[in-house]
Image (cartoon, helix red, strand yellow):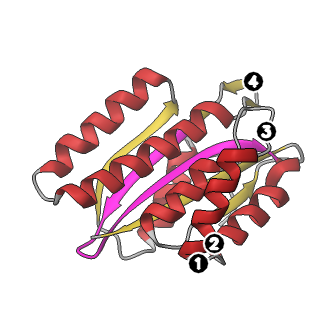
């Protein structure tokens, strides 16, 4: 599936992707600019909805993944304009569940020049065992190279460490300069 820019938003693209999967219960969905106030509201809403059905350890992991993923959008989402319609650093979040897992999917626009570097970094994380992830996390805390947006990849490393599951990611080319980054974390129940 290719994003054409003709839909009502990126959330439609994500929804179409989820319709093909076995996930039937979407707990939370939001598309818009991710501010600190929105982050607090979304995590609070998710925590409220999940508190009745989950044990504390699963709830904490879902909450942690949501916070890290939303902070990524808040710090790194690029502005985009399509046919005169501005998308000012917008992103989306979708939380879904099955009997076996939760999935937190986020999406945001990034500059296409960063796609290969980000894909290589996430692929590297997926190929590491827990000891290597712990070592990388400590190394990044001590001497990590900070990106111009203020990140050292710690959020991705920490999500991979806390969930114990591989990170799912893809990039949808919008135009030559911009791509839509889709990131999914799986939390086992």
Q: Which numbered disc, 3 or 4, marks the residue that appears first in the sequence?
A: 4
Label 1: which residue?
A: 129
Q: Nearer the viewer, mark 2 or mark 4?
A: 2
Q: Which residue is mark 3?
A: 147
Q: Is residue 106 left or right of residue 75?
A: left
At 57% from the left edge and 64% from the top edge, which residue is drawn?
Answer: 134
Identify the residue at horizontal 87%, vertical 43% (top origin): 177
| Residue at 56% in and 67% down | 167
Residue 132: numbered disc: 2
Asked if disc 4 and disc 1 are in contact, CB closer than 8 Å, the reply is no
**Dot 3: what SS?**
loop
**Dominant secondary-structure state across the stretch colored magenta:** strand
Name which of mark 4 and mark 1 comes first in the sequence: 4
Q: Quadrant of the N terminus?
A: bottom right
Rendering coords of residue 184 (x, y %): 52, 61
Query: Mark 1–mark 2 contact, CB under 8 Å?
Result: yes
On the image, the x and y values in percent for residue 170 come to: 66, 63
Residue tagged 4: 84
State the residue at coordinates (38%, 45%).
Answer: 29
């Amino acid at each position: 599936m290719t994003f054409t820019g003709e839909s009502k938003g990126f959330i439609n693209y994500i929804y179409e992707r989820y319709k093909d999967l076995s996930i039937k219960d979407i707990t939370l969905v939001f598309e818009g600019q991710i501010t600190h106030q929105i982050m607090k509201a979304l995590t609070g809403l998710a925590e409220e909805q999940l508190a009745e059905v989950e044990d504390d350890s699963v709830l904490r992991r879902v909450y942690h993944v949501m916070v890290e993923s939303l902070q990524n959008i808040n710090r790194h989402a690029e502005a985009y304009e399509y046919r005169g319609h501005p998308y000012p650093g917008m992103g989306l979040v979708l939380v879904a569940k099955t009997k076996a897992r939760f999935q937190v999917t986020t999406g945001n626009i990034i500059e296409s020049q960063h796609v290969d570097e980000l894909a290589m970094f996430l692929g590297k994380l997926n190929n590491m065992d827990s000891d290597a992830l712990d070592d990388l996390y400590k190394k990044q805390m001590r001497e990590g190279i900070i990106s111009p947006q203020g990140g050292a990849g710690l959020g991705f490393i920490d999500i991979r460490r806390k969930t114990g599951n591989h990170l799912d990611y893809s990039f949808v080319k919008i135009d030559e300069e911009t791509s839509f980054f889709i990131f999914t974390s799986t939390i086992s129940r």
